[in-house]
Amino acid sequence: MISFGPFRLYAAQRLIEREGVPLHLGGRALDILIVLVEHAGEVVGKNDLMARVWPGVTVDEGSLRVHVAALRKALGDGESGARYLTTLTGQGYCFVAPVSRSSAPKPLEMVASKPGQAHNLPTRLTRMVGRDQTVQEISEQLKAERFVTIVGPGGIGKTTVAVSVGYELLTEFAGAIQFLDLGPLNDPLLIPGTVASALGLPVQSADPTLGLIGFLRGKRMLLILDSCEHVIETAAALAEHIFEEAPQLHILATSRESLRVEGEHVHRLSPLGSPLDDVGLTAAQALDFPAVQLFVERAIASGRRFELNDADAPVVAEICRRLDGIALAIELAAGRADAYGIQETLLLLNDRFKLLWEGRRTALPRHQTLRATLDWSYDLLSEHERLILRRISVFTGIFTLDAARSVAADDDVDGAQIVASVVSLVTKSLIAVSAGDTTTRYRLLDTTRAYAADKLVESGEADAIKRRHAVYYRELFERTETDLLVSTNDPNLRSELLGNARVALEWSFSSRDDVGIGTSLAAVAAPFLSELSLLTECHRLTGRALTALGDADRGTRREMELQASLGSSLIHGVGLGLKGALAIHYGEAEAGVQLLRHAIDTLRADRYELHNPTFLGILAEGLAKTGQRDAAMIAVDDAITRVESNGQAVGLAELLRIKATILMSAPQADLPRAEELLQGSLELAGRQHALAWELRTATSFAQLRSMQGRHQEARDLLAPVFDRYTEGFESSDLKAAKALLDRLAIIL
C-alpha cells in the first residue's frame, strides 16, 4: 500500500481510496498514477510514461495530456494548496507529494463477508467520462431513499452509470450487490424466476415471487435491475413488492421510462455536456466538456493518431452537439473518425448511414449500432405511438403540441390521442421537453428524428405529412404579426419558426406539385427574415420564390409582397457598399474598391439602383487613390449621367466635386475644368441647403485656390462656410477644413 495525502493506493489490486472511499479513476489515469508514484520525486519522461501505459501501441502526446488532466482533476491537484503532480516542460512529469509505503493488504471491508454475498457486477469501464458527480448523487440518493430508477434515451449511458454506482457502493453493502440484465428476457413471466435464480434460490413453482420475497426480507443488499423498459409492467410490480416487503433492500433500476410505482425516485440522466458556441473555441476549452473528452478518448482507442488541435476543436464540438451528447452516438462517431477524418465525419452526420455505424463487438446487441438501439425502443411502442413518432419527425428543432396536433391528426387520429401519445413518448425518453417562458415545446433528438423520418418514408405518408407541416407554418405566419414575432421575449418561438419554415420551404420548392405552398410560405416568412436582419437568406428566398411564381400569381398581392421583401433584403448589398466606402475613407482603397464593385454589380442585377450613383462616386474616389484615374473618371461620369437622367439632383453636388478632385490630381491637371465643376457644385449645394456638401466643396475649392497661390481667395471661400457650424467639430470634414484654414492663416 502507498499512502499520500488522504489517498491510499493498492497497486496490485488497482484500487485507490480517498479517506477510505473508493475513488473513480479511469484505467489509463490509474496506470499513469502507479508509474509516477513508483518513481515519486523523479522526473518520468513523456516517452517512457507512454511506453509503460500504452505498451506496444503508438499514441500521440495529446492522449497522455488528456489522461494526466483527468488524474489531476480526480486527485484535486491544486485545490486548497494540495500538490501531487508537476509538469517539467520538454521533459515529463514528476510526483511531488510525500509518500509512505506499507505491506497492508487490500481493505477487508471490500471483500464480501459470505460467498453468497459476492457481487456479480459487470466489468467496469476503464474510464467513465463526465458522470462522476452523477454517480455520487445517485449513490447518496439510493442510500437515503432505497429505490432509484435511472431514466434516459437509449445509448445515453444508463447501464454504465448503474454499474459505476454498484462499484461505488460495494463497501456500503459489503459486496452484497446483484446485477440483473433484463434485456435478453422476452417473456415478462420469467423475471421473478430469473431474479430468484441469480440469488441462488431454487425455483420450484410457476411464480416464485413469494419465496423470493421471503428470502429477501431482512437482508441488506442492493439489487440492480437493468433495462426494464420492454418488461416494464412485470418489473415494476416486482420492484414495488420487494421495496414494500424487504425494508433493508435497495433497488436501482434503469429504463427508458420510469416504473411509476410506490417508493420510486426517478433520476433522469442528462446528455454529456458539449460546448454551446464554436466562436474562438480552442482545444483546451473544448476538452473541459465531457462529450469532447469522450470523443477524443474513443478516437484514440480506435487506433487513430489523434490529438485535438484548435482547428479541429469547433468541428468536434459540433459533432457532439449534433449527437445531443448521447454517449453511444459519440463513441460510434469517434470510431469512424479514423476512416473518414473529422470534417468528413461531421458531414456524414447528415447521412442515414450513421445509424449503421458499429461499436464494440462486446457490447450488447442493442448497443452495437444506433439503429439497433432505436429499433429496440421503437419495437416497444404501441402501433399508435409509432404512428405519431413517425409523423412528428417532420419537425426540425422544437415544436408545440398545437403544431403536433395540426400536422399529425387525420380522420383516424384526433388531437386528444396525439397529446396522449406525445406525453407517452416523453416518458419513454423519445421526445425531450423544452420549456419556454409561456409555452412548453418539444423536440426529437437528432438521431431519433433521422430514424423516425426513415420510418415515415417507409410508411408512404412522407409527402402528405410534409405538406401539412408546410401549410401549418404558412398559416402560423399569416395569423401572427411580424413585429410580434420579432419582438417576442420567447426565443424558442423564433427558433421554432425559423427551423421549421426552412425545412418546409426546401421541401415545397423541391416538389413540382407543391411550389405554390412554397411561394405563399416564402411571401409571409420573408418579412420575418428581414426584420431579424437575415437579409442574405431573405434575398435568396424571395429570389427563388419569384422565379418559381406561377402565371396565375403574377401581378397579385403575393408577387407584390415578395418584391417588397426582395427590395428590403437588398439593404445588405447597400451594407457592403457602405463598408467599402468606410474602407476607402480610412485608407484601404483597394479593399474598398472591391467591396463597392461587388455591391454595385449586385444592386444592378436586382434592378435596385437607388444607392448606385452615390456608390459610383465613392468608387471613383477609391479608383483615383489607387492610380486608376481613367476608370475613376468613367465611374463618376456614369454616376452623374444616372442622376441627371432620373431628374433627381440629390448628391449631384458631391459627384461634381469628386470629378473636380480627380481632374486636380491628374499629372496634367485640367484646372479650369475643375474650377468650373467646383463652382457649379458650390452653387448647387447652396441652393439645396446641403451644408455638408457645401463644406466639402468649399474645402476642395480652397485647396485648388491654394495650389494656384491664391491663398486669400482660398480663405475667403472656406471661412464663411466653416463659420456656419455650431457643432460636430470632431467630424473628419470639419477637422480637414479647420486644418486647411490654420495653414492658410500661417501663410497669410
Image (tube, rainbow, N blue to C red):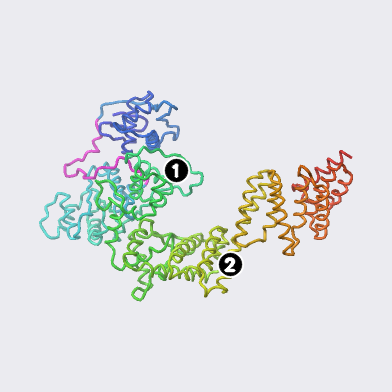
Near mark 2 (Cα within 10 A), the count class, few <14, some 14-19 or many ≥20, is some
x and y, in percent, of residue 422 in the image: 36, 65
Q: CA distance from mark 1 to mark 2?
A: 42 Å
Across and down, in percent, residue 129 comes to 36, 43
Residue 11 vs residue 618: left or right? left
* Majority secondary structure in the magenta region: loop
Dot 1: what SS?
helix
* Residue beneath the point at 40% across and 38% down: 307
Displayed quadrant of residue 614: bottom right
- Kind of residue at badge 2: Gln
Residue 70 image label: none
Image: 360 above or below 602: above
Residue placed under numbered mark 1 in the picture: 313
Q: What residue is pinned by disc 2?
A: 563
> Which amino acid lies under the numbered mark 1 shown in the image of this protein?
Ala
What range is drawn magenta here? 105-133
- Packing grade of label 1 (10 A; few <14, some 14-19, many >=20) is many
- The secondary structure type at the circle numbered 2 is helix
Q: Nearer the viewer, residue 76 or 579?
A: 579
> Which is nearer the eye, 613 or 398?
613
Which numbered disc, 1 or 2, marks the residue that appears first in the sequence? 1
